[in-house]
Image (cartoon, coloured by chain):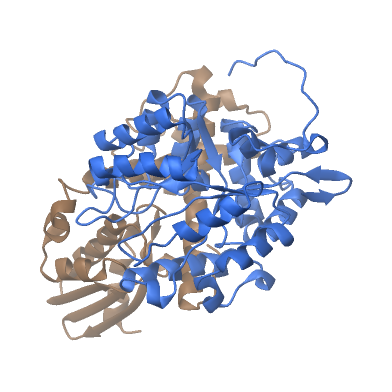
């Protein structure tokens, strides 16, 4: 919980990781390139006081994660969204055993989502069913630019991907977090394109699709799809740290999201350990749309409460203490766009 | 800088990052250039190892094409440094293998469609810039009125020139009587759709500008450079 100016905010960090990118876990040069890329994101967008030494960035471990999120980060509940990256890391990038054990030890504080890769075919489907039972999955994280043998990417509307989404729907894995990356097959097309999200959102209406980085670097395509598909949501991972270095740009992003989606479909996340939640939560509560952007309405406290935690809590059935909930809204006439 | 080096830099200035719609020379993507008689060697760099390989290849192969087209060059080497596909792309460039020859099973036909997609986005953003500025300078104008604004109504300045260049890139004309707010085929929108189309164009402009900020910042962080505002 975070409190400021007499207001209390319930915080759900909807995208965190427990990764291991230490040299002994790097399978090849790409393992180093990948974590170096993350570290440049971290160094470029963090306030100076929040920049970690490179060595610490390679691996955090359970204790540090618990401290950064819950002792000093104001987070009430966090959701693991692991990336496997088996072609880059010997034991994978996201640490399945350690993270899931931590979530099991602290079910009130942590939810473990797992990942799948439709290119694993029947065997992967079987594994998905086992994982669903083992972890009690409510959600999954899918990275479409994962390398896999000769293939370096897949699309959500590939036939095998449909099989996995059908299984997810059947197994009650309702919350599908999508992270687009730079590679896809064929390379003829834009790998960041989100048109496949549109298709699966239409075909799997029982599932929620949370598009991480709110579709960045294709914010415009994402907004247009999310406007038409009520089960498409925006994750603020990677977008929210712009609040420090480029507040005007962040104002434009949040202004666009509120215009095209609505305040119920935007989720806060620090993307830990890319960034830490404490400064992001503080900065977001203090944030207001800059005055030179008159095309956007000011952010309200209620909107901030929803984005910082209430939206994700509702999606994941995370209990919110009564005093942190918003007063019940009176039903209003539905505005027609 | 010698005349020949300036020549090389000018040629590289015609190469645009399709996603960011800016010349690679302005973005700091040219790491080094070396001229030795009729031999030119250029090294390119990008903000991350994981920038999209298709865009990386487009810029590197456009750079090579631009340098080969100079009348005095005989041997041209373009290399992309520090990228996850550096080896693949540099081998392809050295062998003039083309897109399909470079990416083999990962390539299907060509990158033409990708290029067109981003030229259209660049046009959309330029259109929004010109029209939003018009709205700000002319208090009597409301969004729906943009329906009747033509190229001739725009002030003669850099933003209008930029719009005309981006129109030309997707095959649209520059007649002053042509409407400004159009789709990529040049067709105007009905008056009642204008506010929505302007909003959509704005999100495209914000997206491109935001990506450019981020890429500049990451490049500066990666190579320990002074970060320049665009």
Residue occupying image coordinates x 30% and y 40%: A125
Q: Nearer the viewer, residue A276 or A17?
A: A17
Query: Residue B120: horizontal and vertical position, in percent?
Result: 36, 40
Measured along the vertical axis of the image, is residue A330 above or below residue A159?
above
Instruction: Work out whether residue A253 can be spotted.
Output: yes
Residue occupying image coordinates x 78% and y 32%: A326
Q: Nearer the viewer, residue B29 or A34?
A: A34
Query: Residue B100: horizontal and vertical position, in percent?
Result: 13, 54
Q: Is residue A99 left or right of residue A11?
A: left
Measured along the vertical axis of the image, is residue A196 above or below residue B119?
above
State the image quarter where residue B124 is shown.
top left
Residue occupying image coordinates x 28% and y 67%: B11
Measured along the vertical axis of the image, is residue B110 above or below residue B225?
above
Q: Which chain is blue?
A: A
Instruction: Work out whether residue B168 can be spotted.
Output: no
Measured along the vertical axis of the image, is residue A26 above or below residue B195?
below
Q: Nearer the viewer, residue A270 or A138?
A: A138
Q: Is residue B59 left or right of residue A81?
A: left
Drawing shade for chain B = brown
Query: Residue A82: horizontal and vertical position, in percent?
Result: 46, 53
Q: Where's the N terminus of chain B, which quadrant?
A: bottom left
Extreme bottom residue here? B36
């Amino acid at each position: 919980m975070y409190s400021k100016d007499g207001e209390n905010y319930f915080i759900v960090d909807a995208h965190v990781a427990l990764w291991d990118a230490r040299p002994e876990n790097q399978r090849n040069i790409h393992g180093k390139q990948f974590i170096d890329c993350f570290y440049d994101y971290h160094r470029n967008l963090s306030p100076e006081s929040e920049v970690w030494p490179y060595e610490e960035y390679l691996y955090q471990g359970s204790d540090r994660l618990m401290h950064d999120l819950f002792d000093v980060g104001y987070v009430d509940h966090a959701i693991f969204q692991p990336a496997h990256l088996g072609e880059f890391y010997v034991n994978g990038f996201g640490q399945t055993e350690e993270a899931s054990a931590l979530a099991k030890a602290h079910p009130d504080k942590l939810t473990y989502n797992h990942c799948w890769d439709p290119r694993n075919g029947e065997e992967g489907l079987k594994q998905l069913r086992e994982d669903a039972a083992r972890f009690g999955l409510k959600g999954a994280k899918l990275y479409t630019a994962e390398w896999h043998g000769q293939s370096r990417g897949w699309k959500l509307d590939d036939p095998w991907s449909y099989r996995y989404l059908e299984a997810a729907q059947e197994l009650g894995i309702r919350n599908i977090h999508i992270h687009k990356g730079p590679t896809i097959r064929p390379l003829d097309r834009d790998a960041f394109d989100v048109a496949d999200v549109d298709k699966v959102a239409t075909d799997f209406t029982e599932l929620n699709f949370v598009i991480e980085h709110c579709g960045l670097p294709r914010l415009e395509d994402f907004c247009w799809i999310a406007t038409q598909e009520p089960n498409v949501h925006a994750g603020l991972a990677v977008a929210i740290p712009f609040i420090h270095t480029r507040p005007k740009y962040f104002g434009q992003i949040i202004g666009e999201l509120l215009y095209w989606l609505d305040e119920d479909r935007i989720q806060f996340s620090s993307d830990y350990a890319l960034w830490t939640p404490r400064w992001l939560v503080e900065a977001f509560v203090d944030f207001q749309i800059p005055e030179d952007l008159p095309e956007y309405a000011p952010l309200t406290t209620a909107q901030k409460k929803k984005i910082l935690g209430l939206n994700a809590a509702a999606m994941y059935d995370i209990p919110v203490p009564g005093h942190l909930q918003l007063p019940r809204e009176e039903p209003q006439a539905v505005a027609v766009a | 800088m010698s005349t020949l080096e300036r020549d090389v830099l000018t040629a590289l200035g015609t190469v645009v990052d399709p996603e960011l719609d800016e010349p690679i020379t302005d973005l700091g993507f040219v790491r080094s250039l070396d001229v030795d008689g009729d031999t030119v060697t250029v090294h390119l760099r990008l903000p991350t190892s994981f920038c999209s390989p298709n865009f990386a290849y487009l810029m590197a192969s456009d750079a090579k094409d631009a340098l080969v087209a100079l009348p005095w060059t005989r041997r041209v080497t373009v290399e992309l440094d520090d990228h996850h596909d550096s080896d693949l792309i540099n081998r392809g460039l050295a062998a003039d293998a083309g897109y399909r020859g470079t990416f083999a099973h990962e390539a299907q036909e060509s990158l033409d469609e990708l290029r067109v997609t981003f030229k259209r986005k660049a046009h959309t953003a330029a259109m929004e810039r010109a029209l939003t500025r018009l709205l700000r300078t002319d208090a009597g104008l409301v969004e729906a009125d943009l329906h009747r604004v033509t190229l001739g109504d725009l002030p003669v300045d850099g933003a209008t020139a930029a719009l005309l260049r981006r129109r030309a890139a997707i095959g649209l004309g520059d007649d002053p009587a042509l409407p400004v707010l159009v789709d990529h085929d040049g067709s105007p929108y009905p008056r009642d759709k204008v506010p929505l189309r302007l909003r959509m164009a704005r999100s495209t402009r914000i997206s491109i500008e935001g990506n450019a900020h981020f890429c500049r910042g990451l490049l500066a962080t990666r190579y320990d450079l002074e970060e320049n505002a665009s």
